[in-house]
Image: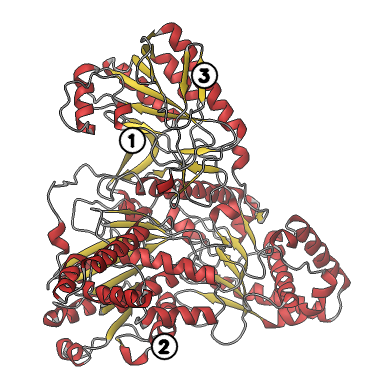
């Protein structure tokens, strides 16, 4: 019976590919399908749709609550199963494959259906540096091809190295498993060269998917755009997916490349543009009100992969609002100091000093190189993980400076190899001391790696140095990093060609003193981020203290940016109605000045809003502190305010509470860091500004919300003498979290109107009606509602599949705040942040469903 239903469901999905779920159901009715079967099919598709939309990872922000047409791979698919099997054979774990499947499914589900008559979707996927973004967009490409997308354009950075690397990956993982199904317009050694007569060429190969991997180079893009112009008839019904790798580089605010990308999209009546980047600062600051590449339809935040070394792991980060400093990881002990006085010895102090510059092999550079050789030998002892071993030396963007390192580094390698083969006791003793010192600071067992003694690696050192290549990798060099021919041991000296997208295989040691001025530039140069399978204890980075502090700051910026996306995913916001905040820095720009022309100071305003806590920690001390803060507020409010006589609805209400008591409570109460809008400082600053501006919010009403009697006698909670209420129950959303819970909704509309007279309300009590009543009855008074939540709250029987018991150490105090709408322009609270300017965006209140209508 199940097999038959699965067959019927598969037939339904095939019909969805040529229409919508609604039209598919109608067609199955015409074929004689029974109502009960159609109901089961509709219910299953709805469950699958919701599963994709509400998937915890990756987090996303979506425009218009777009209908989810793609719910995952199907048995007859060709491209995703081939890619999945290829990755499995290469050593991917089932968990990693499941994560990739889920994340790529989420992205594809946000694209437009390929059979829509016309569409232009724009989205952004935010990953981590060196975290597998290429594999994600390869999976997205495979799944889009399985569903009918025909033309695939990958904009692969601005350098040949990255374009070639990307082409090779896509050929190996997409083309070779299904060679007869793909037509390649580019190859690893040749960027786009237009075939004659585009329309005839494409029509001849109409049954194949077309793959084109091109650089973001004006001449290349001009040729490609002109070629597409000659194929307009073919493109009219050709769903195209454009993947913009390193989407913040060259794409945004450039006089040539940006208009050309927009021109190319204009030639594609059915296009989905998806930018991929780990540094989305410039993309998030694009002006949304003009024809550009702002991700107006969706933003997806890829989860941090397991065992990935990111900014925070290496550098730690600052404490964010609501965090306990003891809970914030401070980074592994892998960063080594380059003294400021050495910097001018390894890079020119000014542009005038570049000609004839000769670098010195300073103490720290020499130590870094020696440690690189030691770590390479240790990895050979282990015989695990990545077979390549690379060191990065990045001091300048100038190619002449790069080339000046060739002779001294080669000399150091040759002399050191000769000394080791001669058994030089002094050198061996120095190396021994260095190895013992470093392995003591970062023990191998911290990462479950094999401890390697110096005596075991020492015999391998001569061969390591013999195999070590000194490579100048820049735009003018012919000898480039190439990992295709056997295991590589290399010290690579370079600049921009090594700082964007290109993977430095087996990177173990970095010597970095490059001067930079913007977040994205600095972060992209961190080629040391990524996976360190088999040598997680061995990476080291040499840099100045100033650079270390900058990276730590950026780790904080990243965390806040991702937290913004996480928060807004569940709060009914869209990329066109919210702007992600980016914390500023006194010495660094967020991105290049030209990309920040639309940036404005970020501000918060609470007028007319209902703010409520939904995340709570579950430990004793945190919860006990909040109980104490709530009891203190009720005790003092009862004395200084006007308590109402006992109510019949099991709630308590104290009117005319001075604002000073409320702001004191907000400072004492510990909001969870994920409840970003519930921020003590923002709330108290807003209250102070609104009082100063208009005199509103001087007086508050404080409510204590009691629970219903129910079948069982509920527990009670005493806030103060005479203020005892039945506790409310709020179970937790199901998940793997052990240190915090998410209850999703605390406050009902009825609770938000507890201090209002609602007797005149006809029909449902809506948010707008509550705002209207408050503006009429309490225009200057805000409401603070307290909830005593039973620590043992359990989900109702019909919700046990999606929720779990609260299991808190103590009863939880929830807080809801309702602010009256301002009589004119609201007060705002500004952070040290910037965001894109959404003021010019005009959102029309109209039915946009026609844009996704499918041509039957």
Question: 816 and 250: which one is in front?
Answer: 816
Reading the chain from its start, which is encountered first: label 3 or label 1?
1
Disc 2 versus disc 1: nearer the observer? 2
16 or 342, which lies in front? 16
The residue at which mark 1 appears reads as 603
SS type, badge 2: loop
Q: Position of residue 262 (x, y in %)?
A: 21, 66
Secondary structure of the residue carrying tag 3 is: strand
State the image coordinates of residue 726 (x, y, percent, origin top left). Answer: 46, 24
What residue is pinned by disc 2?
177
Res 718 label: 3
Q: Quadrant of the C terminus?
A: bottom left
> Disc 3 vs disc 2: which is toward the camera?
3
Q: Residue at x 18, y 54 (%)?
A: 290
Q: Is residue 825 visible?
A: no
Marks 3 and 2 in Cβ contact (< 8 Å): no
Image quarter for residue 387?
bottom right
């Amino acid at each position: 019976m199940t097999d038959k239903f699965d067959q019927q469901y598969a037939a339904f999905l095939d019909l969805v590919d040529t229409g919508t779920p609604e039209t598919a159901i109608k067609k199955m009715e015409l074929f004689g399908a029974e109502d009960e079967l159609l109901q089961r099919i509709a219910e299953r598709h709805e469950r699958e749709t919701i599963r994709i939309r509400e998937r915890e990872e990756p987090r996303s922000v979506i425009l218009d609550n777009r209908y989810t047409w793609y719910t995952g791979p199907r048995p007859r698919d060709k491209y995703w199963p081939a890619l999945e099997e290829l990755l499995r054979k290469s050593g991917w774990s089932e968990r990693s494959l499941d994560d990739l499947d889920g994340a790529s499914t989420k992205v594809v589900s946000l694209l437009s259906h390929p059979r829509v008559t016309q569409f232009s979707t724009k989205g952004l996927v935010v990953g981590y540096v060196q975290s597998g973004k290429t594999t994600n967009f390869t999976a997205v490409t495979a799944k889009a091809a399985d569903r009918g997308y025909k033309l695939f354009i990958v904009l692969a950075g601005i350098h040949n190295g990255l374009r070639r690397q990307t082409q090779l990956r896509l050929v190996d993982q997409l083309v070779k498993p299904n060679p007869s199904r793909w037509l390649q317009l580019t190859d690893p050694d040749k960027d786009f060269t237009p075939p004659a007569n585009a329309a005839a060429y494409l029509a001849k190969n109409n049954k194949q998917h077309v793959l084109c991997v091109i650089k973001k180079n004006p001449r290349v893009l001009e040729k490609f755009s002109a070629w597409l112009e000659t194929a307009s008839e073919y493109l009219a019904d050709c769903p195209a997916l454009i993947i913009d790798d390193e989407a913040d580089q060259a794409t945004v605010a450039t006089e040539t490349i940006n208009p050309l990308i927009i021109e190319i999209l204009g030639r594609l009546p059915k296009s989905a543009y998806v930018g991929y980047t780990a540094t989305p600062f410039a993309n998030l600051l694009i002006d949304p009100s003009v024809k550009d590449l702002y991700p107006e339809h969706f933003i997806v935040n890829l989860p941090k992969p397991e065992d990935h070394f990111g900014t925070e792991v290496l550098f730690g980060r600052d404490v964010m609002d609501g965090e306990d400093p003891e809970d914030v990881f401070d980074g592994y002990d892998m960063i080594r100091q380059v003294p400021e006085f050495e910097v001018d010895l390894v890079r020119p102090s000014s542009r005038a000093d570049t000609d004839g510059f000769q670098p010195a092999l300073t103490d720290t550079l020499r130590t870094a190189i020696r440690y690189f050789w030691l770590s390479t030998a240790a990895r050979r002892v282990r015989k695990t993980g990545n077979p390549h071993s690379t060191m990065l030396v990045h001091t300048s963007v100038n190619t002449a400076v790069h080339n000046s390192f060739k002779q001294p580094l080669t000399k150091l390698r040759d002399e050191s190899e000769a000394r080791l083969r001669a058994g030089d006791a002094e050198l061996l003793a120095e190396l021994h001391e260095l190895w013992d010192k470093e392995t003591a600071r970062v023990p191998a067992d911290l990462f479950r790696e094999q401890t390697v003694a110096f005596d075991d690696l020492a015999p391998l050192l001569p061969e390591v140095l013999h195999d070590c290549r000194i490579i100048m990798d820049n735009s003018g060099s012919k000898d480039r990093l190439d990992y295709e021919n056997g295991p590589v041991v290399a010290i690579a000296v370079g600049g921009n060609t090594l700082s964007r997208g290109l993977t430095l295989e087996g990177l173990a040691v970095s010597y970095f003193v490059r001067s930079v001025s913007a977040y994205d530039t600095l972060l992209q140069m961190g080629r040391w981020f990524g996976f360190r399978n088999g040598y997680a204890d061995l990476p080291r980075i040499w840099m100045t203290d100033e650079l270390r502090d900058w990276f730590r700051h950026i780790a904080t910026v990243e965390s806040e940016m991702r937290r913004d996306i996480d928060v807004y995913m569940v709060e009914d916001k869209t990329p066109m109605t919210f702007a992600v905040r980016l914390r500023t820095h006194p010495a660094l720009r967020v991105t290049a000045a030209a990309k920040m022309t639309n940036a404005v100071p970020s501000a918060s305003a609470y007028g007319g809003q209902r703010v409520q806590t939904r995340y709570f920690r579950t430990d004793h001390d945190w919860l006990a502190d909040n109980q104490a803060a709530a009891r203190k507020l009720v005790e003092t409010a009862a004395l200084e305010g006007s308590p109402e006589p006992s109510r019949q609805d099991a709630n308590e209400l104290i009117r005319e509470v001075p604002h000073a008591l409320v702001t004191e409570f907000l400072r004492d109460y510990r909001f969870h860091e994920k409840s970003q809008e519930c921020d003590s400082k923002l709330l108290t600053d807003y209250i102070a500004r609104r009082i100063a501006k208009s005199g509103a919010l001087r007086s508050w009403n404080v409510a204590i919300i009691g629970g219903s009697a129910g079948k069982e006698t509920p527990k009670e909670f005493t806030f103060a003498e005479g203020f005892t209420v039945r506790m409310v129950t709020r179970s937790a959303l199901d998940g793997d979290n052990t240190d915090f819970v998410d209850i999703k909704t605390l406050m009902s509309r009825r609770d938000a109107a507890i201090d209002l007279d609602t007797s005149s309300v006809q029909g449902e009590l809506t948010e707008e009606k509550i705002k209207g009543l408050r503006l009429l009855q309490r225009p200057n008074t805000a409401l603070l509602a307290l909830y005593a939540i039973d620590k043992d709250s359990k989900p109702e029987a019909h919700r046990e599949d999606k929720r779990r018991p609260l299991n808190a150490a103590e009863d939880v105090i929830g807080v809801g705040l309702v602010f009256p709408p301002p009589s004119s322009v609201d007060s705002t609270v500004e952070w040290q942040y910037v965001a894109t300017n959404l003021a010019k965006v005009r959102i029309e209140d109209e039915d946009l469903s026609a844009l996704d209508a499918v041509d039957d």
